[in-house]
Image: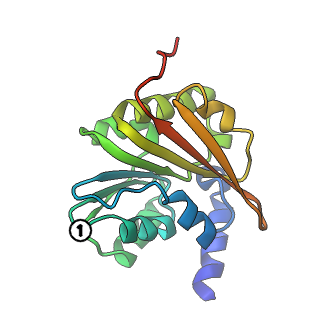
């Protein structure tokens, strides 16, 4: 209970960075990870690691030879997860998702994100989505959790197929599952 209160305070204090005022629910963690591949040697990129709740769920779903590159801008969250999740498959990158191409040089099998697109500029959003699409292999998913469905329109022009899942509880959370099948038209 003490850790949960600390987490809620940390998220609220950093609302514009985290886009959340509490940790994600178990329903979100399960839904956002549903397209992860159990195959060997996959690479998952996570944006907005926070305190690692989704990170732990990703690690449960991937093989022992797979890897997670988790991006987080908050140094306190990075330090917390380094201590809380001592897993050799996890690489914590204290940087913005905008810089993913500076750190990831190979094809990505999945992107899991909880970054606050609501608070990002149009340019930031477009860069993150376009760079992610470029790095993703054909047949992979970009899965995003947000408290609103209004950002869905930012994803639709970038990805080849998008769906939105509404998880009914308080607060209502939306999961966007966006597929790259390699048939996208080039963005102008």
Question: Is 53 above or below relative to 121?
Answer: below
> Residue, x 30% and y 51% (percent of image)?
43
Neighbours of disc 1 within 10 Å: few (<14), some (14-19), many (20+): some
Question: Is 66 above or below relative to 79?
Answer: above
Left or right side of 105 for 139: right
Render colour scheme: rainbow
Q: Secondary structure at mark 1?
A: loop
> Residue, x 69% and y 63% (percent of image)?
21
Q: How many marks?
A: 1
Q: Can residue 51 be seen?
A: no
- Quarter holding the N terminus is bottom right
> Residue, x 39% and y 77% (percent of image)?
84
Q: Nearer the viewer, residue 12 or 104?
A: 104
Residue 85 lies, in percent from the top left, at: 36, 75
Question: Is 91 above or below relative to 182?
Answer: below
Residue 112 lies, in percent from the top left, at: 47, 52
Left or right side of 48 for 171: right
Left or right side of 95 for 142: right
Question: Is 66 above or below relative to 157?
Answer: below
Left or right side of 134 for 17: right
Most distant residue in the top direction: 188
Residue tagged 1 = 64
Residue 122 lies, in percent from the top left, at: 62, 28
Residue 185 lies, in percent from the top left, at: 49, 16
Most distant residue in the bottom direction: 1
> Residue, x 55% and y 66% (percent of image)?
29
Q: Quadrant of residue 120?
A: top right
Q: Can residue 94 be seen?
A: yes
């Amino acid at each position: 209970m003490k850790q949960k209160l600390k987490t809620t305070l940390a998220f609220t204090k950093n609302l514009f960075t985290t886009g959340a005022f509490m940790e994600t629910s178990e329903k979100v963690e399960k839904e956002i990870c549903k397209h992860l591949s159990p195959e060997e040697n996959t690479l998952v990129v996570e944006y907005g690691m926070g305190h690692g709740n989704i990170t732990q769920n990703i690690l449960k779903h991937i093989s022992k030879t797979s890897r997670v590159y988790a991006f987080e801008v908050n140094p306190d969250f990075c330090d917390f997860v380094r201590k809380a999740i001592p897993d050799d498959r996890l690489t914590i990158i204290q940087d913005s998702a905008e810089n993913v191409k500076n750190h990831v040089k190979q094809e990505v099998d999945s992107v899991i994100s909880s970054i606050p697109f609501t608070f990002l500029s149009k340019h930031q959003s477009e860069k993150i989505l376009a760079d992610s699409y470029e790095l993703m292999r054909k047949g992979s998913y970009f899965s995003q959790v947000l408290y609103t469905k209004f950002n869905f329109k930012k994803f639709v022009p970038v990805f080849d197929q998008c769906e939105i899942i509404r998880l009914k509880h308080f607060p209502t959370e939306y999961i966007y599952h966006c597929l790259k099948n390699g048939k996208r038209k080039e963005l102008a």
